[in-house]
Amino acid sequence: MFKKVFPLSAILSLRFLGLFLVLPVISVYALELEGSTPLLVGIVVGGYALTQAIFQVPFGAMSDKIGRKPTLLIGLLIFLAGSIICAFTADIYTLMLGRFLQGVGAIGSVIAAMISDLVEEEIRGKAMAIMGASIAMSFALAMGLGPVLSAKFGVEFLFILTAVLAVLAIVLLFTKVPTPPKIKHTYHAAAKTSDILKDPNLLNMIIINAMQKGLMTVAFVLIPIILTSSDFEWQKSDLHLAYIPAMIFGLVAMGPAAVFGEKYNKPKEIFLLSIVLFIGSFLIMGLTTSSAIFIVGVVMFFIAFNMMEPLVQSMITKFAKVHQKGAALGIANSAAYFATFIGGASAGLLLEISDRGTIGISIAVFATLWLFWTLKLQNPTKYSHLYLPLADVDLSKLKGFENAHVAEWYINDTEKVVIVKYVADAMQKEDLIAKLAK
């Protein structure tokens, strides 16, 4: 499984590493460009996410028609072009164009679909956890490297480096990624968007994913601008003093959170703790007059973000039924990208019309409402999978089969196998076989 998932996770990680490298410094860089305002800066910070949200579904549909690999190549080439435009911009509007173009290459849904093609359903949650962890690692690495490299070589260099990472991703695509099999399934129910949104756990995960990403862009608009403002009077070259400790603590927190959430099946507790840390971080960053205490707030934010990141995609796939997984991930990621854009634009607007303390308190109140909403989340049920040769199954029994302890069934038409997803603690495999056998 790891050999199948790692190259795809690496491609996505390289792309996110490029996007994340500029996040710690792009707001102060953009603020100095011709035509800049705080609102336009906020749009630049989150701009890639708006086009990412818009093009998620079209890219997924394109991959169904022309294949996963050609679609990934197109997305990476567009991302490469956007990165080059950003590297050689002289005004805020050209930078905005480049950021929008970076997001047009929306390959996240294609990679998720490709993982689904390559990995068996019962270990798909682990595959998504690997993908989430790789993104979290990219985030943490970028937070350490971005400020240091920009101080030494300039922000333009970060965009050039992003373009190089896109080329490396293309090389990986054609040297390490296997061509997925074309597998046809028959499901015992159709995927409906309304069913996904009516499921309280899936809806909760969509909100968690969106809020986490939205707060990310809020933070990356505010942190560098506040630190370099008259409140603290930091130099841009000193920003790494805030981000490197945050990166280290974020990395340390990520491992135990992933183990506790995945192995011990306690993601709800991790999510609630992360939200509490988000609340505390924005209160501290909004109200403190001490640079050292402000850095504590930044560290708390990074810990919260990195604790969530490895679990989000995995939990969505665990709560969704097998025929809903693609749609659920698509909705969740589109919502997250819209929230990313809204977070950046809102933070820029708030900087124009409000003071730091009011901003921090307002975000903390909003996150507190999120905390109470998330209390309704349940930890996922642990299921087992039964594989039966199609020739041994009575299809009339299968099509009418309903059981309180069976989540779903589906047929792999290509490999002629029936897969039944059930609660092993509640029923015996032998009884299940007897109920379905010819």
Image (cartoon, helix red, strand yellow):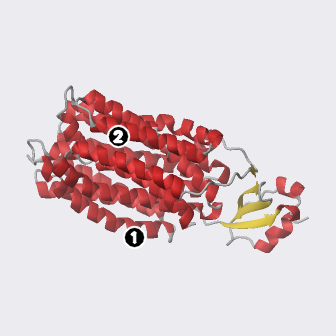
Q: Residue at x 74, y 50 (%)?
A: 184
- Left or right relative to 33: residue 87: right
Report if residue 19 is visible in the image. no
- Left or right relative to 256: residue 205: right
Give the amino acid at mark 1: Pro
Rendered-image quadrant of the N terminus: bottom right
- Left or right relative to 54: residue 192: right
Rendered-image quadrant of the C terminus: bottom right
- How many numbered marks does the figure carry? 2
Eye-nearest disc, 1 or 2: 2
Q: Which mark is residue 165?
A: none
Residue 106's x, y, as percent?
48, 41
Q: Earlier in the sequence, mark 1 or mark 2?
A: 2
Report if residue 11 is visible in the image. yes
- Left or right relative to 63: residue 77: left
Numbered disc 2: secondary structure:
helix
Residue 137's x, y, as percent?
37, 60
Question: Camera-side residue: 412 or 231?
Answer: 412
Residue 357's x, y, as percent?
18, 43
Q: Which mark is residue 83?
A: 2
Question: From what the image shows, is residue 268 above or below residue 330?
Answer: below
In the current view of this chain or complex, which residue is farthest to the right?
438
Give the labeled residue for mark 1: 256
Residue 415's x, y, as percent?
77, 59
Give the amino acid at mark 2: Ser
**Cα distance between the residues tagged 1 and 2:** 35 Å
Numbered disc 1: secondary structure:
helix
Question: From what the image shows, is residue 392 above or below residue 22?
Answer: below
